[in-house]
Image: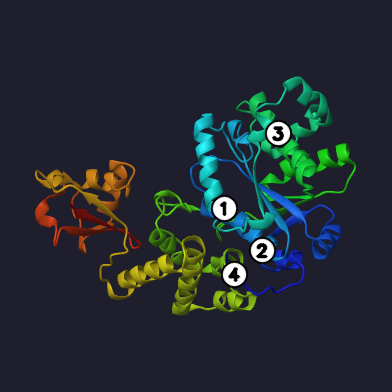
Amino acid sequence: MINYKLEHDNVFDELVERGYFEQATYEDELKEMLGKESVKFYIGFDATADSLTIGHFIQIMVMMRMQRHGHVPVALLGGGTTMIGDPSGRSDMRMVMTKETIDHNADCFAKQLATFLDFEDDKAIIENNANWLLDLNFLDFMREIGVHFSVNQMLTLDSYKNRMADGLTFFEFSYMLMQSYDYLVLYRKYGVKLQMGGSDQWSNILGGYDLVRKLEHDKVYAMTFKLLTTADGVKMGKSQKGAVWLDKEKTSPYELFQYMRNIDDRDVEKFLLMLTFLPTDECKRLGALEGAQINEAKETLAFEITKLIHGEEEAEKAKEASRALFVSGAESENIPFTEISRSEFKDGKGILDLLKELNLIKSNSEGRRLIEQNGISIDGEKVKSFDTVITGDNFKEDKILIRKGKKIYHQVKLI
């Protein structure tokens, strides 16, 4: 577990200063409670994939900071709610997944969360809402819970209003009731008094907050934090190859390092504050650097995030690989690679087919466009034609280094 020096006595002040805080119910009361007692709080994770992403890392950082201030995280896996899907921010219905897939994804999330949070001696709790949602009696649930929700009010919420034109199913409409019920169950089972989440979850979180207050006649609270967005207002966490995953098999430590190393200059300070445990003053000092020096700050950012997610050894390897490419132009054993049988190149393999096989392009048209723009190189030589055929003769010491654009490198090794 990561140790760091607490900069504030109250975690609320830390969340505000580091840029996480968006809004909360009864801010003054909540701040006072967080300063005086150990608070059980929860954040939910719908199991829509078999790995968390860099977009989830804000939630994980908040949980780590809260835990280090003596509060108790409850990580709630959405084994039940994932079977419906949250309509918030979506223009279509989420793909319906099988229970087996959802269970597998939830198990993967649990293993990843265990690398960031301390679950010993009940310092953190992991739960799965499948435990209470999958066997609900519909009529009993609607009599106890459904009566507290106004359809008129729900239809004014952006999460539902934006879907009305294209059709909103009752299946999705029930998501808020399920998430609200989670808060009630966790309050009754563990004494959870705070739900936290991204700012896009405010409506859903308030649903649970209101429900607990109505049924339990106790004060509970809600807080949201800012989404991880770039200076251009785009949700962070997408790369040319898709989502940036926390699983090293899906996004290698090198790829994660490179992704963070190449962010916009304007985002450096914000990401240092929100995604690392470096002291606030140091984050601001690094973020204020200009010119070539800002690249040092980006390297620090990339190293710290890769270290948090994959460990210091992997972070060092990724840094060495990055420097090898961008400082000396040399190859490195830490650059992502794919092994392909030598026999596949006996009669030659078209460059477009190879690029698609390596997931460097999604279509032939994308590959043609890149080649026309001199965006593909092999061992430092620009590929001039999209009819280029790669044979065994192209491989020096049984490997080639492909570069896409200025920042993406991939090796192919013959076996």
Q: Which of the labelled discs sits on residue 277, or is there none?
A: 4
Residue under the point 85% across and 63% down: 32
Q: Is residue 97 visible?
A: no
Q: How far is disc 1 from disc 4 in space, using C-alphas?
A: 17 Å
Q: How far is disc 4 from disc 2 in space, using C-alphas?
A: 9 Å
Q: Position of residue 154 (x, y in %)?
A: 76, 33
Q: Amino acid at mark 2?
A: Arg
Residues marked 1 and 3 touching at CB (< 8 Å): no
Quadrant position of the N terminus in the picture: bottom right
> What secondary structure is marked by label 2?
helix
> What secondary structure is marked by label 3?
helix
Q: Name the residue tied to disc 1.
A: 113
Q: Nearer the viewer, residue 261 or 215?
A: 215
Q: How far is disc 1 from disc 2 in space, using C-alphas?
A: 14 Å
Q: Position of residue 189 (x, y in %)?
A: 76, 42
Q: Residue furthest right?
A: 217
